[in-house]
Amino acid sequence: MSDTSALVDELRATLAHRAESRGVPAAAVAVVVGDEIVEHAVGLLSTATGVTATTDSVFQIGSITKVWTATLVMQLVDDGLVDLDAPLTQYLPELRLADDDALAAITVRHLLSHRSGFEGDIFTDTGRGDDAIAKYVELLASAAQIFTPGALFSYSNAGYVVLGRLIERMRDTTWETALVERVAAPLGLGTVSPSPYEAILHRAAVGHIGPDENGVPTPAPFWALARSNEPAGSMLAMSAHDLAVFARAHLRDGATPEGGSILSPASVAAMRRTEVRLPRLAGMGAAWGLGWEIAREDDALLFGHDGNTVGQSSFLRIAPDAGVAVVLLTNGGDAAGLFHDVVDPLLRGLTGHALPAEPVPADDATTDGADAFVGVYANSTVEMEVERDDEGRLWLEQRPRPELRALGAEPSRDELVRFSDDALILRERKDGMHVVLAFLEPDDDGRASFLHVGRAVPRSS
């Protein structure tokens, strides 16, 4: 392993250049090595105001919030208030879904590991009141059941909102209050901001979207997403340091700096244990635990989570055997590219192991034998069509529905080539990666029933 101080010196010397080369307005990094946390921040929190990033600046952490929600759920398990394998309706008897049989079968474990099977991307804004999450859960009565609970992995924001409601019910408080009182306060975290009302008290990053005519990243038109999606990651913000302290608690079997505990060692271990393996995809891990994304399952275990809001992206990786965690928070540009530029050399130097390689198309990749994948796949937020043109080339056309377009998604058309027996891959990079489409559950005619891109999207024609 390389000398830690040399790696830190290199990080501080190169982060600004690397961020600028990737078009990232501001970036903050925090690295846990044993008991020490090393931090650095560069760039502008907003290109409109010119406010510079500092190590105490807060960025939105997006879906990394889900690990905080999972931690709160595992506290309920530690307190004997929740059984992971009991029917969810035992704790939320008012919950209704479109499929009564599925509802009866869903457990808390299914929700934590993204295997509930009901529609997972519902972003309805139910207002700013303390009942926002409760109102959202009521809307799930009409949510489509995509697959039998437990049958597949399909990343689910909606499932984590239901977990947020579980926390509210069992703790008799709001999700926000539970998070602050039961995680942030015991860890001594001063910048954790569940909403804009707290974030505004700090040096807050603004998200940025595609560059303007002068090549300058443009501040996003709004900062916060809907309160109803808070437990899934719509607006939680904090400094890289505070996220690193949270990661360090998971490295220390749940121990806090003051000698207390936010989780039992058994629950910490359960969260990072594989619950379901994923098809080979771009930008996602090999497996999922109870909240944690497991990037590598081998002897050099690596887990973490990523997060995205409008114009902000966050990354967390933890190597428990080495006692190392790395946090990267950004506010625009090619965040995925910067993640590999920064996190890969840090992990190599501190643990001896690199990030898992991202999938790329073979130079001689063809589209032979891919006709079983052709068709239309759709859910409530997007329609995805795989089609073959007159020249025999394959294309993915994505048509976001209005709810997703309101969050910045645009229609797109990208060429596909063969990646494996059951997967296609984008020929060109998109959002910093070659996106992989896995095709699952062939029907009697051999046609794939699901297109899987982290979400299992069912065939519609």
Image: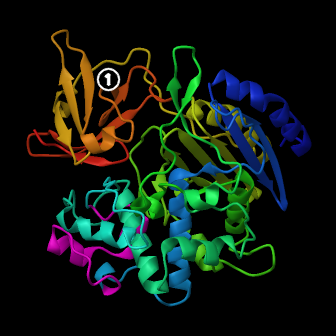
Indicate left or right for 49 with 65 as reference: right
Q: Amino acid at mark 1?
A: Leu
Q: Indicate the secondary structure of the residue bearing disc 1.
A: strand
In the rendered image, is residue 431 in sight?
yes
Residue 251 falls inside the magenta stretch: no
> Which residue is at a point 26% across and 22% down the rendered structure image?
395
Quadrant of the image occupied by residue 364: top left
In the rendered image, is residue 83 in sight?
no
> Which residue is at a point 57% across and 14% down the rendered structure image?
214
Indicate left or right for 246 with 227 as reference: right
Image location (x, y in percent) of residue 248: 73, 63
Image location (x, y in percent) of residue 269: 60, 71
> Which residue is at a point 47% across and 30% down the rendered structure image?
431
Image location (x, y in percent) of residue 334: 57, 29
> Which residue is nearer to you in this view: 239 or 359?
239
Name the residue that disc number 1 marks.
416
> Which residue is nearer to you in this view: 64 or 239?
239
- Image quarter (top left, top right, bottom left or bottom right) of the N terminus: top right
Indicate left or right for 15 with 64 as reference: right
Boundaries of the magenta span: 90-117
- Image quarter (top left, top right, bottom left or bottom right) of the C terminus: top left
Indicate left or right for 450 with 302 as reference: left
> Which residue is at a point 38% across and 69% down the rendered structure image?
133
